[in-house]
Image (tube, helix red, strand yellow):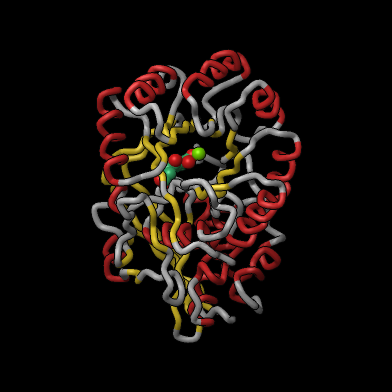
Amino acid sequence: LNIDAIHLREINMPLAHPFETSFGMTTGRRILLVELESDGLTAWGECVAGEHPYFSDEMIDTAWIITETELAPRLLEADLIGGGSCPEVFKQVRGHRMAKAALENAVWDLHAQVERVPLAELLGGTRQKIPCGVSIGIQTSKERLLDIIEAELAAGYQRIKLKCKPGWDNNIFEAVRDRWPNILLSCDANSAYRMRDFDHITTWENYDLLMIEQPLWYDDFYFHSMLQKRLATPICLDESIRNRRDALAAIDMESCRIVNIKVGRVGGFSEAIAVHNAAAERGIPVWCGGMLETGIGRSHNIALSSLPNFSLPGDVSASSRYWTQDIIEPAVTVSTKGEITVPTTPGRGFEVQKDRIEALTVRRQSLYA
Ligand code: OSB
Ligand code: MG
């Protein structure tokens, strides 16, 4: 594969509903998209870096400059066999995994088109349908939260994940369990707790949570392992897991019993597959996380989720939960059984709506071989 041109663009999209986590509130997204041109084909990648460096140390502006000055020039010069060639091409650049992932995933997207196979198949996927859950942000009231959960369960979603933080935890877990004693329920603290909270977190054992996601520091394994030893409820790590080695360390020291895989967080599909395989070999289930993606990132998450060890419902959900109008056609929809059907057509399986993207673009830059 040879890349003839790389187009970077920033699109601005308002979220259909604000999304609040322990690290902040998001009302609209600034998203870096990369578009590859190769022999008349067009492929896409979405960078999941946020508007601020709050989830991780990357943000859209750092991803933009690293892509423009370091990554894209290397990719334009490279001889690529497929997306799997990218880690080697980018290896001199340390970190900036979300920036690398956008380009690498676009190369996989291109390769699937060239080979005329579904992206899911190229990645090694085996599932025809993926089980879906929802991540529900911090709300202004408990009543509002319960109404949202009721609607998501009625839509068919298989698992409810509650964003939590000190002051928005036991009170909501209690209310949700009172009303729905048997649903799959988990929580995600996005690093809002500290060692002084260990006894407090231990009280969550009463709520029969499927898992507790990233309760402590975003870069920690050791203290999560101390906490996990005190809990029957599995800890799931998100922020901490940057690559396969991190997954091995976390599993071996029992910092977690479940791993959330976000393809952007680990630097692209190659590393995401490596994390998936490492976890599978050790009997640790994984699921696919989300980063408020547009349909481009969403379609890539669907393809990844078709790998066999994605056995728990993920955070990949319908486009309409985030966007009044997505930038792909058709939009991602979820069945009443809470499943997304993995496309069987070549490539990502969703058409990118270029005219809509043009209308949303606020910044652009093109690089040529
Ligand atoms: O921690 O999983 C997270 C969104 C932005 C940043 C971090 C997280 C999330 C979510 C949303 O939980 C998942 C989704 O895209 O539906
Ligand atoms: Mg998370």
Q: Is residue 12 above or below residue 73?
A: above
Of residues 104 and 336, the one nearer the viewer is 336
Q: x, y percentage for residue 262?
A: 54, 50
Q: Quadrant of the C terminus?
A: bottom right
Does 140 sit left or right of 230 as displayed?
A: left
Image point (63%, 18%), residue name: 195
Q: x, y percentage for residue 116?
A: 49, 81
Of residues 234 and 145, the one nearer the viewer is 234
**Residue pushed farthest bottom?**
39
Q: x, y percentage for residue 133?
A: 41, 44
Of residues 283 and 190, the one nearer the viewer is 283
Of residues 164 and 363, the one nearer the viewer is 164
**Residue 51 visible in image:** no
Q: Is residue 234 above or below residue 314?
A: above
Image point (43%, 18%), residue name: 170
Q: Quadrant of the N terminus?
A: bottom right
